[in-house]
Amino acid sequence: MVANGLGGIYYTRVVLPTMLLLLSSLYNAFFSTSLDDAITSVSLVELSFTLIPFIVFDFREKGFLLFCTIFSFFILVVFPLSWGYFDMGYDGSVLREGPLAVLTTCLALFAQIGSIYGLAVLNRQSEERSTQLLSEMNEKSTEAEQARKALEVNLEKLEIARTEEANRQWTSEGIAKVAEILRSHGAGSHIYDSLISMIVKYMGANQGGVYVVDETEPGQKVIRLMACYAYERKKYIDKSFAPGQGMLGQAYLEAEYIYMTQVPKNYITITSGLGEATPTALLIMPLKINDTVEGMLEIASFHKLAPHQISFMEKIAENIAGFIQNNRINEQTKKLLESSLQQTEEMRAQEEEMRQNMEELEATQEEMRRNEQAHLDEIARLMQEYHSNTGLLQKKDQEMSGFMLAVDSTLAMVELTLEGIILTANERFLSLMGYTLPEITGKHHRLFVDAAHSQTQAYTEFWQKLSQGEEQIGEVRRQAKNGKDVYLSASYTPVFNEEKEVVKIIKFAQDITQEKQAALDYQSQLEAISKSNGIVEFDLNGNILSANANFLALMKYEAKEIYGRHHRIFVKQVEQESEEYQQFWEKLRSGEYISGEFERVSKDGTNVWIKGNYTPIADINGKIYKIVKYAQDVTEQKMLERQTLLQTEELRAQEEEIRQNLEELQATQEEAVRQALELQAHVTAVDASLATIEFDLQGNILKANQNFLTLMGYELEEITHQPHRIFVEKGYGASSEYHKFWQDLKEGKAQIGKVKRLTKQGKQVWLNASYTPVFDEKDQLVKIIKLAQAIES
């Protein structure tokens, strides 16, 4: 065993054939001196022994076979060359000739044949074994192939199961996220923004919207867009559909979802900042619960939607529909509960009042039984006082009736509950807002408020303060039935009961729409003036109150450097000490308007010539309280006049004062009147010193002041409704530069600079002009105001 462990079995099989071959070769060498006289039988035996390694070794044992083959070659070919050294001198003729030679030859042939047969048998066995192994291998290969196919099928099933499980997990997580949003965001409209942004992101879509069926108007259904999300941004779009209108309205009627992979090119109107692209897929999913459609979900995507994504949308659609339905039911229930609580409170108050009356009645009866005569005397006295008080009350009632009649004919009045529900309103309020009483009774106050403001925190706090007993007074903007804005000076007054509890709200209001619009128009004109003029305000002592950017740039100061300092910082020392300078301020304090050209000194000491006016501004009582100066830089013009000596006459603007007397409003309108007067004074000052003209958005002339008409040589009737290009050369009027000039104005961009214009006689006039867009209270561009001054002729 030890020998076998060391490889002895292999060496034994090597030694056996090699030793036999070596012995037979030595035997042949003893009887022969060379290969030519070798004994045939022994040589045949040697050949037989060379075949033994192929019998005892397998072909896989190549090393041993190779060694034995080389050894056999050496014995058969090389070793005979040395036979002469082994010759023993024996006579081997008996082995070469005679019967013994034949016998030994036959035995050698038999051994040879036996070896060959052994090899054949061994080869046969090897073939059978190989065939058996090949067959087994084929069987195992077939089994392996079948196992592989089965494994592939199982892997496919496993992959399908894993995908389905992932889809289920994805769906479950999405439903959970939707449920979390519905649970945690309350019932406000902002929940739809959170909901649609989450769905669009979760679906990997590019845009989407959520619609809710609005049944606010009895008998009328509107599918209204509540929230829109596109390209990772919230979109502010107001859109609504009637049932049956478009694909969305059709999906509402059919109560079935619509999935399209060929979206019409113009169906989607929302674009990103990088351009416009039509989505690949569109899904319109009805929000349906219990066969009732509460709204719609619309999802657009650049990739097709998988079946599990559509299934997910169906599942969350039912959840969202349930949420909308519950909110609607809760809102209705809340209204009914509030109404019920109000009725219960009223009944409880009536019962308490009746109980108190009964107790008082019983106490009175008991007292009357104890002292009937005293009560009779008291009753007589009380009856006398009653008649006396009744007369006083009737008188006061008449006075109060007259007062209320005066208030009712002067002020608009409306009564509301603590929740903002309208109880009643007088004829003046109804006429002002354009409604009839049945149209507003029972409706909420937000009927008169634009939708955006009614959803703000300020509006909510407004009603909270009223319900807490805090009076609200001020100017408010409301919307009439025809949609126009109405500005009111209003007071909302809480009404308390005997228990000091707020029971209702009374609103008194007065229409100040015209005054407000006038103030806005004046403000727009003032802004236009401020863009082309330097403006600085002084108190009556000449101390600086404020200055605009144009004035600061002209005088090269910072605002903090001049506020609170006297006007004399802009005046030369000689002029400061003069009597004329003192009289200058005395005239302004007395209300005298002063205009002209003034030489002033900037921060760096350079002389600056200013053309402008000093305008005293009065309050609503006519008392001067500040001075406003409007100025334009004419330094370059003055320097040109001094250098060329061609112009010796000072330019003075024609003055035309327009004073408009405004009726005095009530105490709550004093601020609006003061602002209107102040703005009127600004406009008057500008109109007296500048040429002004107004255009519509197409460049057609609306009106112009006398300064402009005189400068251009026209009458007002000649230019009204005429295009602006009558003042420019034909070539410039047809140029792209002129077209861009008006396009910029239409986009709200002011244009300021020096321009060349033509008078009626064809003479060229150079103007220092500003074209200022004017906006209304809704930030809508309504007209263009041009302020101009001739700088050379």
Image: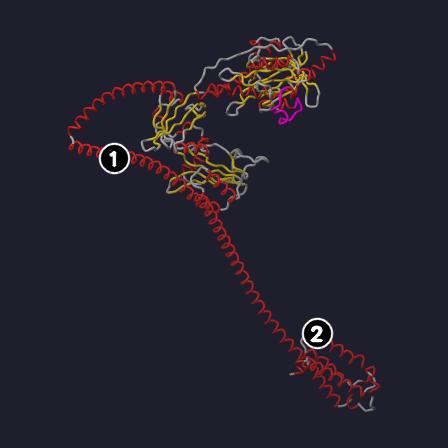
Frontmost residue, 463 versus 673: 673
Label 1, residues with CA under 10 Å away: few <14, some 14-19, many ≥20 = few
Determine the secondary structure under disc 2. helix
Q: Quadrant of residue 501?
A: top left
Q: How many marks?
A: 2
Q: Which residues are magenta?
A: 553-567
Q: Quadrant of the N terminus?
A: bottom right
Considering every residue shown, the one lying at the far right of the view is: 84
Q: CA distance from mark 2 to mark 1?
A: 122 Å
Q: Which residue is mark 1?
A: 351
Query: Where residue 384 appears, x then y in whole percent?
Result: 21, 22
Instruction: Give the left or right position of residue 443, taking residue 732 as reference.
Output: left
Instruction: Give the left or right position of residue 408, taking residue 516 as reference.
Output: left
When the figure is inspected, residue 698 is found, relative to residue 304, above or below; the finding is above
Determine the secondary structure under disc 1. helix
Judging from the image, the colouring scheme is: secondary structure
Query: Where residue 180 appears, x then y in whole percent?
Result: 45, 46
Instruction: Check residue 6 for magenta coloring.
Output: no
Label 2, residues with CA under 10 Å away: few <14, some 14-19, many ≥20 = few
Frontmost residue, 666 versus 67: 666
Mark found first going from the N terminus, 2 or 1: 2
When the figure is inspected, residue 722 is found, relative to residue 463, above or below; the finding is above
Kind of residue indicated by mark 1 = Glu
Q: Can you tell which mark lies on residue 62?
A: 2
When the figure is inspected, residue 151 is found, relative to residue 295, above or below; the finding is below
